[in-house]
Image (cartoon, rainbow, N blue to C red):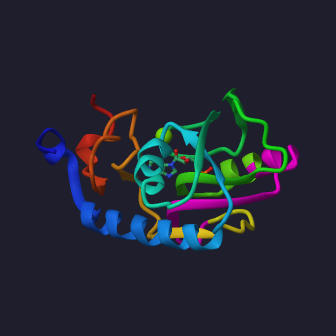
Amino acid sequence: MDVYDADIEKVLLTEQDIQFKLAEMGERISQDYEGRSILLVGVLKGAFVVMADLSRHIRLPLEFDFMAVSSYGAATKSSGVVRILKDLDHDLKDRDVLVVEDIVDSGLTLKYLLKNLAARKPASLEVATLLRKEGIQQVELDVRYVGFDIPNEFVVGYGLDYDERYRNLPYIGTLRPSAYGGS
Ligand code: IMP
Ligand code: MG
C-alpha cells in the first residue's frame, strides 16, 4: 500500500499474521458452534474488514448484521459514552449472536453494547475481536475469541482508522508523528 508508506512507523502485524490468526479463530468458532447457525454482528465501521475475512473461515450457516455507534470525545480516546447511530435489522431473540470487533481498547464501547444486546434475549452472546490492548481494559469483559494482545499504542490498518484513513491497509501498524494532525 505505497500511498501510506511514508506515514507508517512500524508494522505490528503483517497481512500473513492476520490471515493466519483469522483462520485459526474461524476454526475454533466452527467447532464451538457446530450444528448451529450464527448471527454475526459487526460494529461499524472498523469491524467490516475483520468480519469479511473471519466469516470466510467459519464453516457454518451465517447471517450478518451491522450496528453503527459513535463514542463522544477525542479522536484517539474512547469516552465510554455511546450513541447508536444505526441499529440492527435482526431480532436477536433466541439467536446465537457473535459480536465481531476490530479492537478492544478501554472496553467501554463493548461493555455498553453487550449490555444493550443482552437485553434483547439472544440464546447466546459472545465476542470475537482481532485485537485487544494489553492491560488497560477499564472494565471486566469476557471476550471469548481474541486474535492478538497488543501493546498500548495507537494502531491503524485492517479496518482501523486515524481520522477515517488507513482502513484499507492490509496490515496493522503504528503511525509516524508526522502523520498526525495534517491531512
Ligand atoms: P474502546 O476504548 O474499547 O471503547 O474503543 C472504542 C473504539 O475506539 C474501537 O472500536 C476503535 O474504533 C477505536 N480505537 C481504539 N483503539 C484504537 C487504535 O489503536 N486505533 C484505531 N482505533 C482505535
Ligand atoms: Mg475510529
Q: Position of residue 119 (x, y in %)?
A: 88, 46
Does the magenta segment cover residue 127? yes
Say which quadrant the C terminus sits in.
Answer: top left
- Determine whether 155 is above or below 179 in the image: below
What residue appears at the point 22 percent right and 56 percent down from the top-left corner? 9
Asked if residue 148 shows in the view, the reply is no
Q: Position of residue 82 (x, y in %)?
A: 71, 37
Left or right: 122 in relation to 60: right
Left or right: 77 in relation to 164: right
- Please state which of residues 133 and 147 is positioned toward the viewer in this rendering: 147
**Which residue of the protein is positioned furthest toward the front in this rendering?**
35
- Please state which of residues 121 and 130 is positioned toward the viewer in this rendering: 121
Q: Position of residue 121 (x, y in %)?
A: 87, 49
- Determine whether 13 is above or below 159 in the image: below
Q: How many marks?
A: 0
- Determine whether 25 is above or below 71 in the image: below
What residue appears at the point 56 percent right and 67 percent down from the top-left corner? 30
Examine the image and state in which quarter residue 136 appears: bottom right
Examine the image and state in which quarter residue 66 appears: top right
Examine the image and state in which quarter residue 4 appears: top left
Tell me the magenta residue range.
114-136
